[in-house]
Image: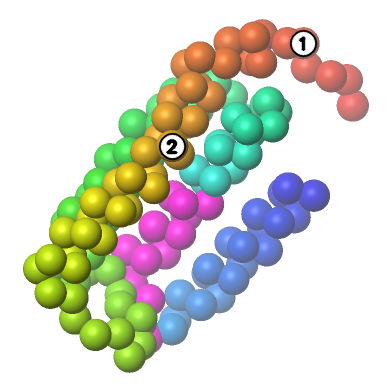
Amino acid sequence: MLLALLLLIYGVVIGTSGVDWMSGVDVADAIFSLTGFVGLCGYAYARRVGSARFWRAWAPAQVAWDLFFILVATPLGWAGELPDSEPESGGESLSTIALSLTLLAPLWLALFRYGYRSQALWDRATPSA
């Protein structure tokens, strides 16, 4: 079920990559966001998805990507803007950055805990199919 949902979302992202307002940075962000969401669900529901080694490597990569996307790519215009969106003023931009970082902090914490602090989950024997 989860795999089917992931494939559907990836298909939508790749299928819309030709849309004028989407850039390659937006597609990369969608992939990072979707993978982070899978890790968040794995942590929240105590389900093993992939390996602990993958999530230990992914957690800092997710943080680095999110910071790059929020602090560099978006202000420089590398990320596509939604059609008919108005430019933000400096104050709106700072509040958007602060809100984004505040909302992403729980995801980052969950990914780190999933990879590094969920040893009992990763030590369980793999159920036979």
Farthest left residue in view: 90
**In the displayed structure, would residue 119 be above or below residue 75?**
above
Q: Work out whether residue 73 can be spotted.
A: no
**In the displayed structure, would residue 75 be above or below residue 18?**
above
**Is 73 inside the magenta-drawn segment?**
no
Q: What residue would you read off at disc 1?
A: 125
Position of residue 68 measured from the top left corner of the image (x, y, whole percent) = 23, 50
User: Which image quarter holds the C terminus?
Assistant: top right
Q: What residue would you read off at disc 2?
A: 106
**In the displayed structure, would residue 44 be above or below residue 86?**
above
Crowdedness of circle 2 by 10 Å Cα count: few (<14), some, many (20+)?
Answer: few
**Is 21 inside the magenta-drawn segment?**
yes
Range of magenta residues: 20-34
Residue contact between numbered discs 2 and 1, judged by CB atoms under 8 Å: no
Tell me what residue is drawn at x 43 percent, y 83 percent: 19
> Can you tell which quarter of the image residue 125 is in?
top right
Q: Secondary structure at mark 1?
A: loop
